[in-house]
Amino acid sequence: MATQSPFSFLENLAQRIVAGPQPPQWMVHEVQQRVVLLLNHVLMQEREAMGRLLGQSGRVARVQWRQFSMALQVTPAGLFNVAAPGAQPDLQIVVTETSPLALAQTALRGDKPTISIQGDVQLAGEINWLVDHVRWDLEEDLARIVGDAPAHAIAQGARRVTQALGAFVARFAGGRAGSQPPDRAPS
């Protein structure tokens, strides 16, 4: 009979703490479903995007960041669906930047994050085309609900908040690196 170390409990506890809290599986499933609905809503506004995905029907792309992952399967309609559990991905996309702050800085600059890609080159090319050419027109969607003028005001306010957040993140990152914020002269 093998004996366990008395510290195995502490070791397991430390591993769980380092990994961070894990959301319940039902929550992960619901978030993934909402992401698919949003992606498909945006894709349905771009007929060319759907047409490009038609040729990739049945293919599975898995996107991963840290311990979070999502597998998407291309449907015969040229849209996405959550892939079945255990589905083998044809394309593996791993976001290699682990820092949420660095990812936020990259997004606010309008840049793409650093990624590692393995698998089907055609599927990777089509997904890259989608990333480069398909944009969500949030203002247009808001206008359908609240009207043109309020939607424009909301979108303009959101752009200002995004710009302010970008400036704050840039200053915060600059301060951590030991550099002066761009709008201040050195003392």
Image (cartoon, rainbow, N blue to C red):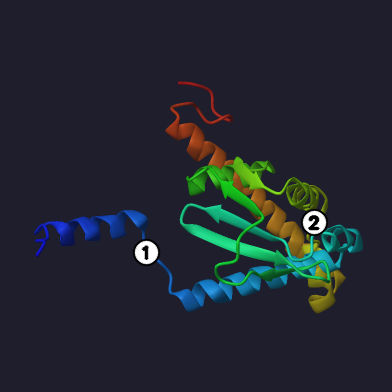
Judge whether 8 appears above or below 76 on screen.
above
Q: Secondary structure at mark 1?
A: loop
x%, y% of residue 36? 68, 69
x%, y% of residue 153? 77, 63
Question: What's the residue type where badge 2 is placed?
Answer: Arg
Of residues 186 and 120, the one nearer the viewer is 120
* Residue 130 seen in the current view: yes
> How many discs appear?
2
Quarter the N terminus occupies: bottom left
Q: Secondary structure at mark 2?
A: loop
Name the disc covering residue 150, or none: none
**Outermost front residue:** 1
> In which quadrant of the rendered view does residue 8 lie?
bottom left
Judge whether 38 appears above or below 185 on screen.
below
**Outermost top residue:** 187
Question: What's the residue type where badge 1 is placed?
Answer: Pro
Q: Residues within 10 Å of mark 2 (few under 14, many from 20)?
A: few
Q: Residues within 10 Å of mark 1 (few under 14, many from 20)?
A: few
Which circle's residue, 1 or 2, is located before the other in the chain? 1
| Apparent side of residue 98 relative to residue 147 in the rendered image (left or right) | left
The Cα atoms of the two marked residues, 1 and 2, are separated by: 32 Å
> In which quadrant of the rendered view does residue 47 lie?
bottom right
Name the disc covering residue 21, or none: 1
x%, y% of residue 48? 90, 59
Q: Residue at x 30, y 60 (%)?
A: 16
Of residues 37 and 67, the one nearer the viewer is 67
Q: Residue at x 81, y 64 (%)?
A: 43
* Residue 168 seen in the current view: no
Name the disc covering residue 135, or none: 2
Q: Residue at x 67, y 43 (%)?
A: 112
Q: Residue at x 50, y 32 (%)?
A: 174
| Apparent side of residue 182 relative to residue 131 in the rendered image (left or right) | left
